Image: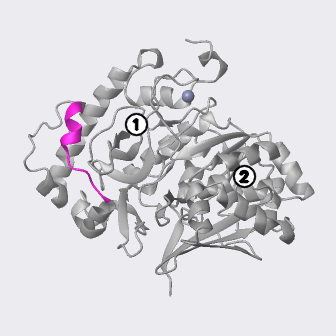
Amino acid sequence: MSTVAACFAKSPLEAWIAKRMGASTPSLTRATIEQHQLKALQETVAWTRSHSSFCAHRLASFPVDFPRSLNEVPLLPLTTATDIAENTPGFLCVSQGEISRIVTLQSSGTSGAPKRIFFTAADQELALDFFAHGVAGVASSGDRMLIALPCEREGSVGYQLAKGIARSGVIPIAHGLSADPAETLAHMERERATGIIGLPVQMLALSLNESKVAANVMRGLRSIVLCSDHVPQSLVRTLRKRSNAEIFEHYGMTEMGLGGGVDCEAHMGYHLREADLYFEIVDPLTGEVLPDGELGEVVFTTLNRTGMPLIRYRTGDVSRFLPGPCGCGTMLRRLERVQSRIDSSIRLGTYGCVNIAMLDEALFAVPGLLDFTAKYFYGARPCLEVAFYAPRVAASHSHATLVNALYTLSPIRDAASCGEVELTVVRASAPFPATGAKRKIEVHERG
Ligand SMILES: [Zn+2]
């Protein structure tokens, strides 16, 4: 073990994955993991071919024992969100009576049909198992974790998370999305929360609250887990200044069965749920698998799901596998923090592209900014409109500060300076409503 590795506790996912694969922790190797994944891939391909009408058709020409090695996985066809939206019943591998949860998701496109993801009780149990073991890296038994995610309905992400982490002795405090920072902070104080899990922008609003309650609560936090959206590093820097809590990041989506991976104390990328999911990075244009270190689209295959397994599902997220070992000493792979979405960039005339992740980094570096929205209006006179919420920043300074921050992005500065794209910055008088959806630049036609 290297000296760096000794500085951080090893990710608890390694022992969990070893157990799931029937190995002991010291004997778990990449070869063991890959052997297990290959076997699970073969079973998933065989299961979908015999139970899913959509996959039976697509996989008909492959040999029965396919894939015979992980090198053959890239020969399997990719699955898109559109495939699911247009062929939902064809993906189902069990009868409707065996389905215990259906999640309807809006497609990321502006007018795309919604897609539905189906889970059996056993499929949902896999996520609970991941939450139960993943939480050990961010909290200890007896810690009190406030869940600032939708948790009212049975089967929702917060509900499942609460159920999962309770198995490890962490006490879940169901809260739901934060509608009002003061009310959320009061709940945290009443419940003596030692940790919180929620959306990055909502965690920022809590940390920047100037009340005495906020100061007490933030001082008492040991861990903050950011999830469900892009995590701007400028925002993380502010959280670090406002709290002594260790800040973790979770990566996941409904299609993965909620959980995908979580970083460890070394904060060197997400460790992945490798017993249940097989990840690849592909060139988004050609679909070719890319080597470790190269940026591309995250693609995953479910390894143990029976209701609606997904083979080589294109997430639309841009990231890469990080080469080399983690500072925590595990041999689990590391996926870099998701940088952006494939379909989220807006081209500003001839001056280049911007996306919500770039706006996030630039704008959340502005002291006192709590939130913003961005809309792009295309047409004869394109316009980028940014509305910001910064109630404690003097109106006389905030507009110029926001414009200056946006001008740190050269496509915006150049396109706005020469008049090719109009830049409008407006101050919002009230917080934007929380929806729980991933933030994005909205695109509209300019009337
Ligand atoms: Zn690690």
User: Residue 25: x, y in percent?
Assistant: 47, 19
Q: Secondary structure at mark 2?
A: loop
Q: Nearer the viewer, residue 224 or 2?
A: 2
Q: Is residue 24 above or below residue 141?
A: above
Mark number, residue 38: none
**Does the Cβ of the disc 1 residue fall within 8 Å of ligand 1?**
no
> Which residue is labeled 2 in the image?
365
In the figure, residue 434 lies in which quadrant? Answer: bottom right
Find the magenta span and give its range. 71-80
Q: Secondary structure at mark 1?
A: loop
Reply yes or no: does residue 75 show up in magenta.
yes
Residue at 18% across / 60% down in the picture?
54
Residue at 83% across / 54% down in the picture?
189
Q: Quadrant of the N terminus?
A: top right
Left or right of 290: which side holds 132? right
User: Residue 104: x, y in percent?
Assistant: 41, 68
> Which residue is labeled 1 in the image?
294
Mark 2 and mark 1 in contact? Answer it, CB < 8 Å.
Answer: no
**Alpha carbon separation for disc pair 2 and 1:** 27 Å
Quadrant position of ligand 1: top right
Q: Tell me the kind of residue under disc 1.
A: Glu
The answer to whether residue 150 is visible is: no
